[in-house]
Amino acid sequence: MDSLSGFVEKIKYRNEENGYAILSVESGGEDYVLVGTFPMISEGEYISAEGHFQLHPTYGEQLAVETYEIKTPEDSASVQRYLSSGAVKGVGEALAKRIVKKFKNDTLRILEEEPERLAEVKGISERLAMEIAGQIEEKRELRRAMLFLSGYGIRMNLAVKIYQRYGDEVYTLLRENPYRIADDLSGVGFQTADEIARRMGVRADAETRIRSAVLYVLRLAVQEGHCYLPASLLTERLKALLRLEPENLRQLLLDLQMEKRLVLRCAPNDAEETRVYLANYDRMELHVAAMLKELDIRETTGHTRAEEQLALLEEEEAGLVLDETQRRAVLAAVQSGLLIITGGPGTGKTTTINAIIRCFEAEGAEILLAAPTGRAAARMTEATGREAKTIHRLLEVTGAPTGDGEGDSGRESWSTVRFDRNKEQPLEADCIIIDEMSMVDLRLFHALLLAVPVGAHLILVGDSNQLPSVGAGNVLRDLIASACLPVAQLTQIYRQAAESDIVVNAHKMMDEELIDLGKRSKDFLFIRQGSAEGVIQTMLRLITEKLPAYVGADAKSIQLLTPVRRGALGVVGLNPVLQAKLNPPGHGKAEREFPHALFRVGDKLMQIKNNYQRGVYNGDVGILSDINRFSETLTVRFDEGREVEYGFADVEELELAYAVTIHKSQGSEYPAVVIPVFSGPRMLRTRNLIYTAVTRAKKCVVLIGEPSYFYEMVANTKELGRYTGLADRLRELLQQEAQIE
Ligand SMILES: Nc1ncnc2c1ncn2[C@@H]1O[C@H](COP(=O)(O)OP(=O)(O)OP(=O)(O)O)[C@@H](O)[C@H]1O
């Protein structure tokens, strides 16, 4: 361990979110660089730090700090230096000099014990004296809390978060119920609170412990995509987490229900067990069902004029005759408040959307188009020739920085997401069309419905065989499964599409027809390879040599899609291999090693979480255009040519994107796609997954691996089961209505 003490000359960089900072410290007449997490440190303070000196390739020697203490300056010279540094707002160099001149070696005691006496100094009013005292007190309090919290093994940045939330109540709160921090604070998991509680001597069977564990297990379930858990599964997971059999669980659940933290619901089918919901998910399901019911108004007018428009359209576009389901979908769209259009690739979803737009436009209606991701919105814009936005932008999202994790998973916290378009200020539109609806989760759908104005038509379009949304819920499927909302199911594959084996085989997967992998196809190829190394070599040859010319695209736009993150054939293993080949180091090409990856100018990168401040969203892809060592920033040029700057401390939001998981590829299309097909976790060897991957390709898909694994995936219809109740809620509501009638 190395140590160093000195004055903080300058804070060169600070991340306000997590306290990570780079300091320039003067010690014994020399300047040193210190890096680490330093919450609440100010220039001019005297720091005593321990850590390890390391040699940074660009910045030279720096001390990576593990622990540190802020020392109170003792001699009058140090006190003066501290006060003049700007650490105390309202006190500059001249004033600091006067204070020390007046109180000499007693300055520090005066500051702490009799701050009102500061007013004796010329130029300091009583108010300023109290303000200075307040600041010094606040810093001392924070440091005291940090010390207390670090005694329970709490990391510094978490300690700041806890202190910011509870202030001086932190001491009593932690003693009474340390689990509160896991319940109240996003980013704090049960395990963290449990460890604190253990150190505080809380019993393993304490009620506070079990209550907190219940809420935690339900929050984790939400992160897995569930809206509720069946009671027995909840109990099972609790047992594993707590390592004991929780007693009186039923009563505890009822108490939590009384407190409106969760809701117990009987399943509609008596044979099924009780469903346990977090209160807000229960509310959202109910609310969504109720809003859909309101929207689902069927009219009888508008029919004839829409027929006229369709006739005109067919006249203008040679070869286009809408089939019966497409025609019915268009007519239903103009006559219903709500319509769901679903179908596989090439069944004419876009064609139908365009026909619908035409009918509404002919009536002078205001139309809004949106999709869940930037890429899907860009494709919708291209396909319709009209601006389509992301749903977030449509709803005018505000607030919500990233990095505020929910639970232990580091996902974004919704508590800070605000939409300016909502019930009070709904969208201004007569018709709203949403594409790629399979990617919309319950929360976003709820927000969208709130903003749909009375009397507007809402048209939801998607392929329900795609993977479900990343967030909780299985909205599109539930809407269809409820069987009580108007659905247009498109089934016919069109001529142009029917020539493509990508489209034909995608439909075969769903229809359980055998796919001949030996067929000489123009756009659907399977290359046998038994080893991971063989797969990698074939993949490299395809991406760098064969495919670019074949599909007429540059190598970087050819996408490798894999089911997994880890392992040689996962995202983490493949990206550096592809990077070395597609964007090798070069003279004058800046690069930098970050804890999670090496980035080089020219790299293809993906944003991996929503960042509303920067306006970049999970799944957005761009090219790294600049690394600036001086300002410590990266610049990424995203698809639409927009440049976004990242501080070095925020680069964890970015990942190399030569290879991405199939989950992350949802809503995107690529000229060519390469997919390794190999053994892997059973839950990732499903039909939905391979179907989603294959249908991302526009011109060519190449699968590399063992045919048996491919067939196994196609046969595996066991989807990642999600516990969602929206379909039941819809049925309940509509049945109630039928009974009343
Ligand atoms: N009724 C029709 N008559 C003739 N051609 C049609 C008809 N409907 C669709 N097509 C053609 O079929 C092809 C696929 O249609 P479209 O792009 O609308 O399907 P999609 O369901 O949106 O496909 P994907 O999901 O792959 O984007 C297009 O070339 C389109 O012009």
Image: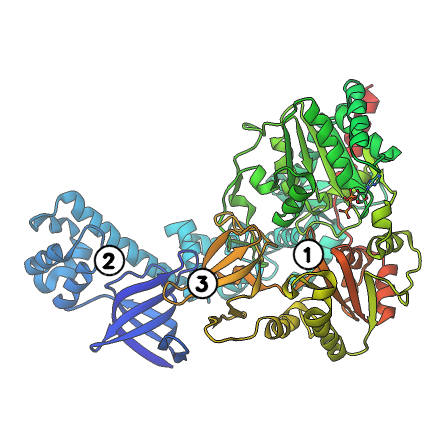
- Residue 362 figure quarter: top right
Q: Earlier in the sequence, mark 1 or mark 2?
A: 2
Characterize the local packing of mark 3: few (<14), some (14-19) or many (20 or more) Cα atoms within 10 angstroms. some
Q: Which residue is mark 1?
A: 665
Q: Which residue is mark 2?
A: 87
Please identify, in this view, whether the residue under mark 2 or under mark 3 is nearer the observer: 3
Q: Is the C-beta of the residue carrying label 1 under 8 Å from the nearest atom of ligand 1?
A: no
Give the structural element (helix, strand or loop) at label 2.
Answer: loop
- Residue 461: percent from left, percent from top: 74, 39
Q: In the shown orientation, is residue 373 left or right of residue 352?
A: left
Characterize the local packing of mark 2: few (<14), some (14-19) or many (20 or more) Cα atoms within 10 angstroms. some
- Residue 491: percent from left, percent from top: 87, 42
Image mark for residue 680: none
Image mark for residue 649: 3
Of the 4 image quadrants, the one containing the C terminus is top right
153 or 627: nearer the viewer: 627
- Residue 655 figure quarter: bottom right
* Residue depicted at 80% across the width and 22% down the height: 308
